[in-house]
Every structure is written in structure tokens, then in C-alpha cells.
Amino acid sequence: MRAYEEIKPAVVIYCEDENAGSAYLNRICEGLEEEGVPFEVVIKSGDEPEFMAQNAARDSRIGIGIFLGRDGTCLLQHTKMPYNMPVMKIHGRLASAGDYRRLGANAARLAKNVPLSF
């Protein structure tokens, strides 16, 4: 585990499979970059998406995490929220590219303490 001083303040994105979710991941990153907030992508798989999103938020120095599953399911989580109540959730088959970009932008807005857009 890295020392606290070595961890950059950034939104942490847990991605189950870099290749399967690359189109979705690119859109999320575009939303974060658009708002000027740094992010870190970590390839990590797990059982429950809500649990993984909460862990991503805990690993983030600013307390904001995103989980992107193989099927396109995506969750935005903050450490102060209960693990089973993500700030925003996208179901893979029902979402458009704009939804993923909006989730990334909302993660950045959450970090900047600016109202979210839905």
C-alpha cells in the first residue's frame, strides 16, 4: 500500500476489463477531463458493483470513485453515501455514450462541489 502522501488527489475508476469497457471508459474520462478533474484508472474485478464502487471511493483521496463493469454497468460513489445508494448508476444496455460522459462530468462536479447535471 502506498503512503498517503504519494496518493494524488484524483477520482479513482475501477474497471473490470480495460478492453471490454474501453468505449465507455473513454466517455467517462472525457467527462472528467472536460471539468478539469484528475483521475486514475485501476483494472480490478470483484463481485458486487456497489461494493467495488465504494472501494474505489475509499481508495480516492477525494472520496469519489467510479466502477465500470464488463457489461457496461457503471456506478458513481462517494464515501459519505451508503454503499448500496450510489450517487449515479448506469445500466449498460440501456445507456447512451452521453450518459457515460455525464457520469464522468458529475464525478468531477461532485469533487468541485458544484451542482450535478442529470
Image: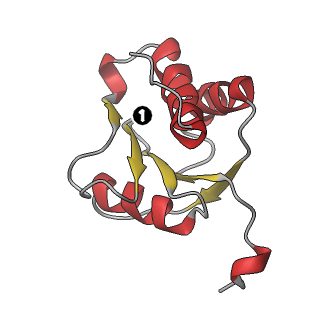
Q: Nearer the viewer, residue 75 or 70?
A: 75
Give the answer, above or below, for where 74 lies relative to 30. Answer: below
Q: Residue at x 70, y 58 (%)?
A: 9
Q: Is residue 90 left or right of residue 63?
A: left
Q: Is residue 62 shown left or right of residue 71?
A: right
Q: x, y (%) of residue 82?
A: 24, 57
Look at label 1 and name its amino acid.
Gly
- The answer to which of 114 and 48 lies nearer the viewer is 114
Q: Secondary structure at mark 1?
A: loop
Q: Quadrant of residue 86?
A: top left
Quadrant of the rendered image containing residue 109: top right
Q: Quadrant of the N terminus?
A: bottom right
Q: Is residue 46 above or below residue 86?
A: below
Residue 110 rendering spot, x and y as whole percentages: 51, 38
Residue tagged by mark 1?
Answer: 72
Split into 4 quadrants, where in the image is the C terminus?
A: top left
